[in-house]
Each structure stands twice: as structure tokens, then as C-alpha cells.
């Protein structure tokens, strides 16, 4: 259960960090709604005992790389290219760990979060 909570927190941070630099801060209500949606998503994903540590490791490495990217002195374009590479690598690794159905849910959740953040940026 602790692993699922850690996984949930990591995925939420991924979703929140994707556009954190380019968008205004989320309101408390938006944060609560995102957390609630994520909890529902996490329950649907239903990771096995074998998948949980693998997914945690993928997410930990991804966040470490994102942190380094944010702190780098690279141009916005270079950071964007590196972010795309990091995201692509993470997705590839997740595809290896998750079942087809789980991966489909993972990608759908990522798309929903991107769409929501884009919509919030417009406001």
C-alpha cells in the first residue's frame, strides 16, 4: 500500500511538473480535484507487487532528471528537447513494465492531465 501511495505521488508530480514553469499556480480546489482524479486512476491501474518497485524506480529516475533539467542553464528550446527525450524514455520503460491495458490507461491519464493543464493556462 505504501508503494501505491508513493507511485500515486510520483505520477501526480509528473503531471503537475509537465507545465509548471509555463503556467500559473493551481488553486487549492484544482489541486484537490487533480488528487481525486489521480486516486481514481491509481485504483484502475492496479499494479502488481512485481510492477510497483519497477514503476517507482522509473518515476524516481525521471524526477531526478527533471530536477536537473530545471536547474540547468540551457535555453528553453534545449530544455524542451531534453524534456521530450526524458518523457519518451519514461514512456518506453513504462510500456515494458505495464500490461497493454495498464499502459493504455497510463497514456490516457497523461493526455487528460495535459489537456487540463492547457485549459487552465488559457484561463
Image (cartoon, grey):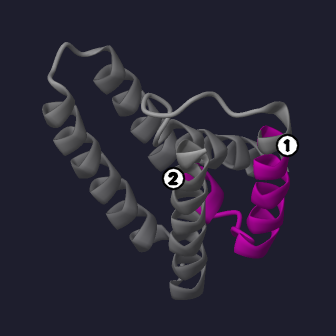
Q: In which quarter of the image is residue 71?
A: top left
Q: Earlier in the sequence, mark 1 or mark 2?
A: 1
Callout 1: SS:
helix
In front of the other: 51 or 45:
45
Reading the image, the residue beneath label 2 is 118
Depicted 82 relative to depicted 92: above or below? above
* Main SS, magenta residues: helix
Q: Where is residue 122 in the image (x, y as percent from the top left)?
A: 53, 47
Please give the label number shown on residue 32.
1
Position of residue 16 in the picture relative to residue 87 (left or right): right
Q: Where is residue 20 in the image (x, y as percent from the top left)?
A: 50, 32
Q: Which of marks 1 and 2 is in front?
A: 2
Position of residue 109 in the picture relative to residue 44 (left or right): left
CA gap between label 1 and label 2 equals 18 Å
Depicted 109 relative to depicted 52: above or below? below
Q: Give the range drawn in magenta.
A: 31-56
Q: Where is residue 85 in the image (x, y as percent from the top left)?
A: 22, 50
Callout 2: SS:
helix
In front of the other: 115 or 37:
115
Q: Quadrant of residue 67?
A: top left
Q: Where is residue 63 in the image (x, y as percent from the top left)?
A: 46, 34
Amino acid at each position: 500500500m505504501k508503494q501505491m501511495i508513493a507511485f500515486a505521488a510520483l505520477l501526480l508530480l509528473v503531471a503537475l511538473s509537465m507545465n509548471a514553469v509555463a503556467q500559473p499556480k493551481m488553486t487549492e480546489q484544482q489541486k484537490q480535484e487533480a488528487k481525486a482524479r489521480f486516486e481514481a486512476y491509481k485504483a484502475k491501474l492496479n499494479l502488481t507487487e512485481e510492477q510497483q518497485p519497477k514503476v517507482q524506480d522509473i518515476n524516481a529516475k525521471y524526477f531526478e532528471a527533471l530536477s536537473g533539467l530545471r536547474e540547468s542553464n540551457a535555453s528553453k528550446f534545449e530544455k524542451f528537447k531534453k524534456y521530450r527525450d526524458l518523457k519518451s524514455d519514461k514512456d518506453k520503460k513504462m510500456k515494458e513494465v505495464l500490461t497493454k491495458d495498464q499502459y493504455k490507461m497510463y497514456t490516457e491519464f497523461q493526455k487528460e492531465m495535459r489537456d487540463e493543464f492547457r485549459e487552465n493556462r488559457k484561463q
